[in-house]
Image: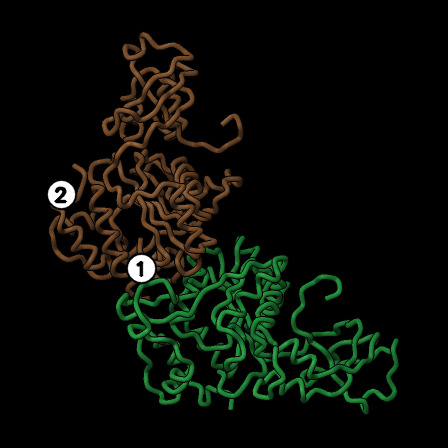
Chain colours: A green, B brown
Amino acid sequence: MPSGVPWTLPITLDVARSEITNVRNGDTVLLTCEESDFLAFLKIEDIYCFDKNELTEHVYGTTSTEHPGVVKTNAMKERRLGGKIDLIRGSKVDYDDVLLRPDDTRKLFEANGWKTVVGFQTRNAPHLGHEYLQRLALSFFDGLFINPVLGKKKKGDYRDEVILDSYKALLANYLNKNKVALGVLRTEMRYAGPREAIFHATVRKNFGCTHFMVGRDHAGVGTFYGPYAAQEIFKNYPDLEITPVLFREVAYCNKCKSLVCDGVCSHSAEEQTKFSATMLRKIILSKDQPPEELMRPEVFEAIKKIENPFVT
Amino acid sequence: MPSGVPWTLPITLDVARSEITNVRNGDTVLLTCEESDFLAFLKIEDIYCFDKNELTEHVYGTTSTEHPGVVKTNAMKERRLGGKIDLIRGSKVDYDDVLLRPDDTRKLFEANGWKTVVGFQTRNAPHLGHEYLQRLALSFFDGLFINPVLGKKKKGDYRDEVILDSYKALLANYLNKNKVALGVLRTEMRYAGPREAIFHATVRKNFGCTHFMVGRDHAGVGTFYGPYAAQEIFKNYPDLEITPVLFREVAYCNKCKSLVCDGVCSHSAEEQTKFSATMLRKIILSKDQPPEELMRPEVFEAIKKIENPFVT
């Protein structure tokens, strides 16, 4: 931003020309959404056009319509409104029982006496690779904030209730609940890779986290970003006020007889089983119990109860 | 130290009165030792007495003769010599092939491109709990410097060659040699707990490490120190210029079916197998293969080849 604040993803209000024929700078308009008739007031300071190709090139590094973020941008309306927002009341949301707002989490972390808290971003049901990373984090930090993204996703991603129910099963059976907080983040995935990693970290700073985990191809899609581009970008943001905790891909090593981050042991890829999203999706759809080194039975049971676990 | 440099363990040259009858301040004396007739010159600036009880109370927190550090101090001769030392040549040492001096390690870490290097102190043959911690470290840091202490130890501790051979077996079979350096540190264990942890960290800073691992009862003996006293003391030394990496005790959890640091999972002590030094010593002396969740077979084979693995 011109002020020097790092802000890597524009979050904007797009409107059609026809919707704003009577609107002028200085006007105050009421914002509504599906879930709320009284969301916020917007005092308009700016009505402007934008170049979609320039935006997608900057944010996503591509104008390819194979990229879901590009498709979404291209489908936006042609004008934008900017200005000061006064929230009237937050929209009523699903999953209220696991919604923690930044004000809540900051109080919670303090009440728990957590001086260091690692934020864990996810849009998946937890497999043992995720759990392994959470265990690594819990070994060194006071608290872990598991913060799944609920909201619009792409085809083949886990549905919101699958992510939540499977995490509840993991917490009920394996991780120390006194060191873990689970709260959902309602935002769209943009699949902007590196820039979205910075955005995700910034959001977790707002929640009160001191650290944020960034793994292989964070918030990536297809092969648009280098596998560790979302880690490297943090070098350009030394003033983010949240420390990235970088880790490499996790696999199960048949020689070590344990999970392992890439590069830790001396064994080759042939001796290891990677966590393939495609393979796990297949196993889950087949309703067969996944191998125990890939997914906890309790987690699988929670997923199995939901009829269509994936976004179609 | 008066200069402000943190230095928590006195390393001094004690002499008997009868040995220094002809020695005055300003004299230069030749220092020799078992392994070298020309170790160093000492230009004497100070000849002084010291109060053994005051020293042991300060350094070890006790004057109890149950403490091996107290026993050692009480056996020291009654005078000390201080002054500037000029090394003539380092004494020839055993295990030359795994001796790395600070100058060597700094060059090695740089040549390897390691920006972050964790120092790992040990006086044991590696069991899976140690390896687990090394894996945690390797997951987040560029390099790991395994730096076993060779030298005088107490009864029941592993003998030097056992520590070395077992680590060589671990590195040959499990950890990524490109991310691990093994070098020995020749110093006596003092069992001074917290103060020795600061000393150990300072020594590893000198080797070029950026981080240093400190676990439960680091450099402790019996029940002289609180289990995490050696971690808490680091709060008093914020300017140490090496970052402690604190972790809790590791156990094998039968419910998680994996190794786990204390507090990470929700399962009780009854569901976990702790690493007991006494139990491992018994198993090793019995020459029976230890359970595979406690010790790697290759490590056990290396130990088994040595007739008397423990200091008697």
> Residue at position x 38%, y 76% from top?
A275
- Looking at this rendering, what residue extends furthest in the top direction? B22
Secondary element at tag 1 = loop
Q: Amino acid at mark 2?
A: Asn
Which is more toward the observer, A193 or A188? A193
Residue A260 drawn above or below residue A115: below
Q: Which residue is mark 1?
A: B175
* Side of B232 relative to A202 (left or right): left
> Residue at position x 35%, y 58% from top?
B178
Q: Earlier in the sequence, mark 1 or mark 2?
A: 1
Q: Position of residue B135 (x, y in %)?
A: 36, 59
Q: Amino acid at mark 1?
A: Leu
Residue B294 drawn above or below residue A62: above
* Residue B45 in view: yes
Marks 1 and 2 share the same chain: yes
Distance of mark 1 from mark 2, alpha carbons?
27 Å
**For the C terminus of chain B, which image quadrant?**
top left
Q: Mark 1 and mark 2 in contact? Answer it, CB < 8 Å.
A: no
Chain label for disc 1:
B
> Residue at position x 36%, y 87% from top?
A287
> Residue at position x 33%, y 86% from top?
A288
Chain label for disc 2:
B
Residue B186 drawn above or below residue A308: above
Q: Position of residue A212 (x, y in %)?
A: 53, 63
Q: Which residue is mark 2?
A: B308
Other residues around mark 2 within 10 Å, as few (<14) / some (14–19) / many (≥20)? few
